[in-house]
Image: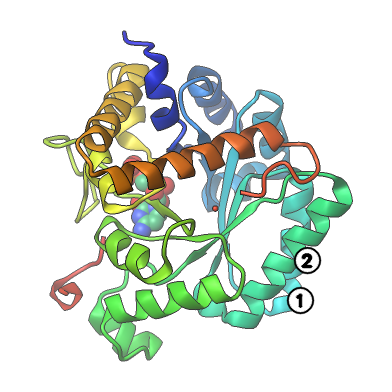
Amino acid sequence: MDFDPNLTPYKQKLMLALDVDSREKAEEWVHKLKAHVGYFKVGLQLFTKEGPELVRSIRARGGRIFLDVKYHDIPNTVAKACESASALGVDFINVHALGGREMMRAAAESLAATSARMRLAKPRLLAVTILTSHDARSLGQEVGLKGRPEAEVRRLALLAKAAGCDGVVCSPREIKLVREACGKGFIIVTPGVRPPGAPKHDQKRTLGSGAALAAGADYLVVGRPITEAPDPVEAVLALARDMRASMEAAPAGAKAAQGRATAGAAGASKGRGKAGGAKAKSKAAAGRRA
Ligand code: C5P
């Protein structure tokens, strides 16, 4: 096993998807991997079952949290929900960009106000642009968005940025277009990461961790490639090695940009719990989008 400290900044970019159905199993993963990954993603299944107590327990064990609950409601309700999430001390939270500018702005303002009042680091607010379970047909005929999915993702990412979101969650295929549209410093979190040659499970379009980073992602949400590996710590290290290799091969500009993102992540972790410490960051018609 390789505990090369040079891999640490890359391991910190990994968000482990806690796709388990109980607090006990989640806590086991936190115990096993808290020294090896940056964040633990708590999604709707686990949060609905285990609630805020689980979030508190992960924090008490030293884990940092991406609360993946994708709020989408009227601005006042989302603002109140964000107030509760801020008070829990999560590090990342998300909303649907389709909730609109006013809703996203209300979320951003609520996070800023609550965390300042409670002297906690502000959770970073991510927007989900278009769910990757949509294709061009369902997006056009059911949701009523007639633009190409990529164009809608771009438009919504820009709207999210203008509304005060810190970044977006997007599929690997959308990283480049979001980075080009929204520029450096706008956080891009991507799921669908698979080491080359590894099983894809139900992910349709995947990228290796190094390729995702090279395309412009800041954080990678990874579940089964780690949790189903015979040695999960070794799986984390392999993902981190691939990231490091791709950054070493990247042009100087890309390296500098990644350096800044890494510094931002480290700052956020240090500032957690202290006031102000974490001011940090087609062809779709042919099928499903991620
Ligand atoms: O096991 P795997 O690496 O596929 O897990 C990916 C995680 O990212 C899961 O929690 C999944 O719900 C989430 N996700 C995704 N695709 C999206 C959005 C979120 O796989 N478009």
Separation (CA) of disc 2 from disc 1: 6 Å
Image quadrant of residue 157? bottom left
Q: Residue at x 57, y 78 (%)?
A: 99
Image quadrant of residue 232? top left
Residue lying at the far top in this picture: please name it. 1
Q: Position of residue 172 (x, y in %)?
A: 28, 55
Q: Amino acid at mark 1?
A: Asn
Q: How is the image coloured?
A: rainbow
Q: Quick check: is the Cβ at mark 1 less than 8 Å away from ligand 1? A: no
Discs 2, 1 touching: Cβ within 8 Å: yes
Instruction: Using residue 13 as the reference point, say whether residue 270 is left or right of it.
Output: right
Say which residue label 2 marks. Answer: 80
Say which residue label 1 marks. Answer: 76
Q: Nearer the viewer, residue 279 or 205?
A: 279
Q: Residue at x 36, y 62 (%)?
A: 179
Q: Residue at x 46, y 75 (%)?
A: 158
Q: Amino acid at mark 2?
A: Lys
Callout 2: 10 Å neighbours few (<14), some, many (20+)? some
Instruction: Using residue 126 as the reference point, say whether residue 269 is left or right of it.
Output: right
Q: Position of residue 260 (x, y in %)?
A: 47, 43
Instruction: Using residue 85 as the reference point, say whether residue 269 is left or right of it.
Output: left
Q: Nearer the viewer, residue 80 or 154?
A: 154
Above or below, comparing residue 281 to residue 260 in the picture:
below
Residue lying at the far right in this picture: please name it. 117
- Asked if residue 225 shows in the view, the reply is yes
Q: Secondary structure at mark 1?
A: helix
